[in-house]
Amino acid sequence: MIRKVERFMRENKMTAPGDSLIVGISGGADSVCLLYILWSLRRKLDIKLTACHVVHGIRGEEAERDAAHTAEICEKLGVPLRVERRDVPYLAAQMNMTIEEAGRYARRQIFSQLMKETGAQKTALAHHMDDLAETVFMNAARGTGIKGLASLRPVRGSYIRPLLCAERSEIEDCLMRAGLSYCTDSTNLDTEITRNAVRHILLPKTEEMVNKKAGLHLAMLSREAAEVTDFLESECEVRQREYVKSEEDAVFIAESFLAEPHLMQSLIIKRSLCELAGTEKDFTRGHVEDILKLYANETGRRIDLPYRLLAVRKTGGVCICRRIKRDEKEPLSENVLTPGTFALENGVLNVKILECDGAVIPQNMYTKTFDYDKIEDTLKLRTRLPGDFIVINPDGRRKSFSNYLTDMKVDKELRDRIPLVTRGSEILWAIGMRSGESCRTDEKTTRALVMTFSRTKTEE
């Protein structure tokens, strides 16, 4: 077993000579075995060990028993031990997490701090092959993508998992041969907890009824998925440089990326979302598909995303950006619109009147033209008011601006910040979105009102 773990560590380049390691130890079989094997290899690998035990404030006397037993094991092996205490139930309530998530978060924070204090290069965790099989089983059932099948890696950043090559039965046999005892966490027997149900009921039943090596095969599947994921990530990085333009708090994904296979499109979008949010959590396949659907919609169409992100269809692609809190900003003051330049919150509006000679004036999302002679009322630049409407068809059909914003799924906190060019209650142009159909230029136009909006930075 020790030689098997050594080979696995060397194959995955887990440590370098002279490294210091933090070893997470709960007192259970897996972590006691991890500490024992690393202690056995300490001279051969030239590594230094510091054990870390976290008391989660959940199991009372049983937890104190585990802490005392862990201290005995560390004293027997001569490994320095750090015991940390955290009120995980309180943390879970404060951060709106499950107890399991909060416990994991607390441990990671403690490991990170201890690495800084001791100068350690890596933290060793005791996940083994059975854990890997359980994780694949649960992630697949929950609808994960291929990346979720490879969530437990031998090496991920500063974390290493030397026991991923070993099954639980091998771990118990190793401890028996070494004469080392361990504690059993009573909560690990509670099959109301999803992982325990998978461990004690679903996987054993699968091995009994489908294949006795189902757990091993799931672990092998995870390793293959990891290799595929690494390859796809490297290909995605190359293509992202071609199709994605990143700015402060925003990315623009050009529609030319639609020439790529659907899988690569999804990876590019997911990677862009994760870079903006700083996490992969809460982004689902549904979010990716919703963004892809934007490419078939008109400019201005938008969808809300987790972590206060917003995806907006723009000319030539889709922009994913952070929604800006605007509660403390003054609303746009009402201005009479005349030729000149007007400062807006995120840019400037330039207004001019041109004599027409039959030539077509180019228009796009940020440049609009209207027949100046058809505009009889005074034009104003303002934000929305009750009763505002926009003409949506050349035959004069109109829609209330409130209903239009609802149809476009515009975030409510943004609706009162949209600059509008209006005549009375009619909106000629919702800047950054769409223009109305009345007062359009045609072959009879002699004077054109041309308005161009220029951004100072990418915001929505």
Image (cartoon, rainbow, N blue to C red):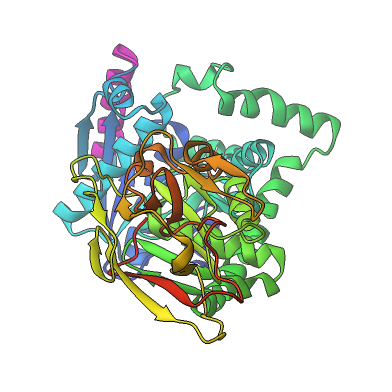
Q: Residue 347: which quarter of the image?
A: bottom left
Instruction: Kindly identify the residue that appears in the image at 30 percent across and 62 percent down.
Output: 47
Using residue 391 as the reference point, say whether residue 30 is left or right of it: left
Counting from the top left corner in percent of width and height, residue 392 is at 59, 50
Counting from the top left corner in percent of width and height, residue 221 is at 70, 53
Using residue 224 as the reference point, say whether residue 273 is left or right of it: left
Image vertical order of residue 51 relative to residue 203, above or below: below
Examine the structure image and report whether residue 446 is included in the region drawn in magenta.
no
Between 187 and 369, the residue placed more toward the observer is: 369
Using residue 449 as the reference point, say whether residue 349 is left or right of it: left
Can residue 329 be seen from the camera position used here?
yes
Q: Which residues are magenta?
A: 59-75
Can residue 170 be seen from the camera position used here?
no
Image vertical order of residue 398 relative to residue 44, above or below: above
Between 315 and 393, the residue placed more toward the observer is: 393
Instruction: Kindly identify the residue that appears in the image at 46 percent across and 33 percent down.
Output: 29
Between 42 and 123, the residue placed more toward the observer is: 123
Counting from the top left corner in percent of width and height, residue 1 is at 54, 51
Instruction: Kindly identify the residue that appears in the image at 39 percent across and 25 percent down.
Output: 99
Counting from the top left corner in percent of width and height, residue 4 is at 55, 58
Between 459 and 214, the residue placed more toward the observer is: 459
Q: Main secondary structure of the magenta part?
A: helix
Image vertical order of residue 350 relative to residue 321, above or below: below
Examine the structure image and report whether residue 73 is included in the region drawn in magenta.
yes
